[in-house]
Amino acid sequence: MKLQHISIHNFLSIGDIELQLAGRGLVLINGINKDTVSGDSNGAGKSAILEAVVWVLYGKTLRDIPADAVINRFTDSGAIVKLDFTVDDLPYQVIRARKHDEYGSGLFLYQGDTNLTLGTIKQTQEKLESLLGMDFTTFTSSIVFGQGYASVFTTMKDADRKEVLEKILELNIFSKCLEEVKLDYRELEADTANLNSTLTTLYTTRDSLVQSIKSLKDKLTKRKKEIKEEIKELTEAIKANAQEGNQLKAQREALLVKLASIDDNLKEYREIVQPYIKEVEQLLNKSRGAYLSLDKQRELMEKKVKELQDRVDNITAEFLNKPCDRCGRIITEAALPHVLASVLQELEISGQATKSLIDQVKALKEEYQKYEKEYNSKLLEKDEKFDEFIKQRDIMQRELNEVTAKLSRIIEALKRMKESKAEKESSTELETITNLITEKQEELKQVIDNIKTHQDKLESFKSRKDVLSFWKNGFGNGGIKSWVINSYLEFINQRIQYYIQQLGYTDLVVQFIPLVATRGDNEVDRVELQVVNGSGGESYLANSGGERRRIDVAVLCALQDLVRSRKGKSANVLFLDEIFDTLDGVGIEAVVSLLGNFIRSSDDSVFVISHNSELKPYFDRVITVVKENKITREENYECEFVS
Ligand SMILES: Nc1ncnc2c1ncn2[C@@H]1O[C@H](COP(=O)(O)OP(=O)(O)OP(=O)(O)O)[C@@H](O)[C@H]1O
Ligand SMILES: [Mg+2]
């Protein structure tokens, strides 16, 4: 990076100053403040030039002036600073403006005619810094020796010093690497935690699967045994039932045979007894008919006898003066005895006939009764036998019914048992359990495979973690950076010692010592300044102002060497603000001659800001800034003294 030219407008006290920065050699910036009675240098606007350089590049000042406070208060336009520089021989221009009429408040970057300005100031700033290869701290530590400015390397905090060195040496790449590694590490830790939690879940799933497979197997064994037992019991029950069924069948057959024989007996009985009864029945009927018809005659005869008796008893009333039945003549009283005799005769005959009839009836009745008795006894005999057959048949039928019912119950039970047995034999229950076991075993296999995959992954995470841990340390404070810084510290210390001697001290040892402190898990690097003045103080602060200033200059020069040692990133300018204020004449001469060492090429410039105009003879050029009427301008005067 080579600064070429700066154009400053309305910045702090400066109205308008154009300044060639490259190839100016050793330049003294002097100042006259004509606004003061004595016309001295203070407040002339010397440091404002350096501030403008820093501001245009980094947007802030060494003095940390608030943003709008950089605008010149006594003009009505905003501030603008333009700086031309080259990087790898390519021309660039950076423009920074604050409340400027044309540019507003912004940062603009060009490479030749190409506008490189990005969307935001921040983005353009980043682009600019990457082009310069230096951030604010690096620039102000190695290019600028600011007036009372806190970032002077010697007075910095030990830890900040290390950071500046890191930046100059561009070790921030390792910080970026460290960030990446840390990010990777964190991600890996998160992934590991996830993996572990997945593994825990998988272990739980695996254990529960193993458990359920075991219970299923136990269940299968138990059920197999139970079903076998049940089938055995059923087989035995079926056998027993079948035997009983066979017995019942045989019993039934026997009963059917018996029943058939009873039926045969009945039939036979009917065939033998029936005609006989019929015959007796016919005889009985015949006898009964004969007996009844004779009894009828007897009845009629008895009725006739009774009538004749009534005639006899009532002979007069019956016959007197009534025509005779035979001759028709009227029966007189005299004729009555004849009539009576005739009637009595007839009565006698009828009585005889009746008597005979009664005897006959009696005989017939006896005969009938005999037949009847015989019939009845036969009938009774028949009925008893028949009843006995029927009774036997009923008993047998009942027995048969019972046997049949029992048999059908047994057949039904047998059927059920056979069905149940078949069901048990072809039972899907065991198959279901077996399938479930296979299913679970398959699942378990997958889970185990999954566990294996995760464990392998975990193992690879572990190795990766080891690698990352290694690089965490490697890129961390105690790692490569430390090693590089320590190596460079040797170089810096050598250079400091060289400049210390150039500045005329032989008994002064100034060196930076690397220190590593452990804070928590981190190793913190620091770079401590050790000053041993053989003829003076034993620390930086214990030394005098002039001594300290020489130490500062020696350190700055050593850092310049470091900056310039960076390929393609070296700067061509050095700004030193009021470096000589505490130096005596010898010191001034020594420092000036030392600074001359930094003019190594035609592009180089060393700008020394000083209120001391007596220094002019030591410099190649003198730039005088004059403040008049509150505005600083450059006096058109160049001293051509050669140092
Ligand atoms: N916004 C501003 N507008 C105008 N003048 C300003 C503004 N801010 C600061 N100044 C003045 O600019 C002047 C220049 O200051 P600068 O620091 O450049 O002086 P110097 O020449 O370096 O003086 P010294 O020798 O005391 O360091 C000072 O008088 C300061 O008060
Ligand atoms: Mg100043």
Image (tube, grey):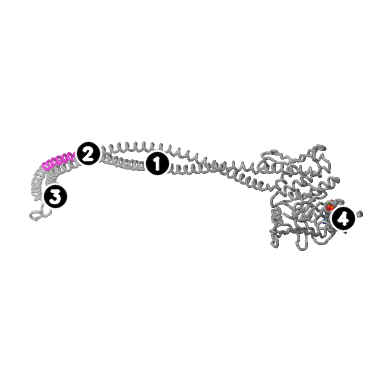
Quadrant for ligand 1 reads bottom right
- Disc 4 to disc 2, how far (Cα)? 156 Å
| Residue pointed to by mark 1 | 430
| Residue pointed to by mark 4 | 32
Residue 501 coordinates in the image, percent (x, y): 79, 42
Give the magenta range: 363-392
Residue 575 coordinates in the image, percent (x, y): 79, 51
Along the polypeptide, which appears first: circle 4 or circle 2? 4
Along the polypeptide, which appears first: circle 1 or circle 4? 4
Residue 388 on the magenta span: yes
94 vs 262: above or below: below
Residue 253 on the magenta span: no
Mark 1 vs mark 4: give the one in front: 4
Secondary structure state at the residue bearing disc 3: helix
- Disc 1 to disc 4, how far (Cα)? 111 Å
Secondary structure state at the residue bearing disc 4: strand
Q: Which amino acid type is marked by label 2?
A: Ala
- Disc 4 to disc 3, how far (Cα)? 219 Å
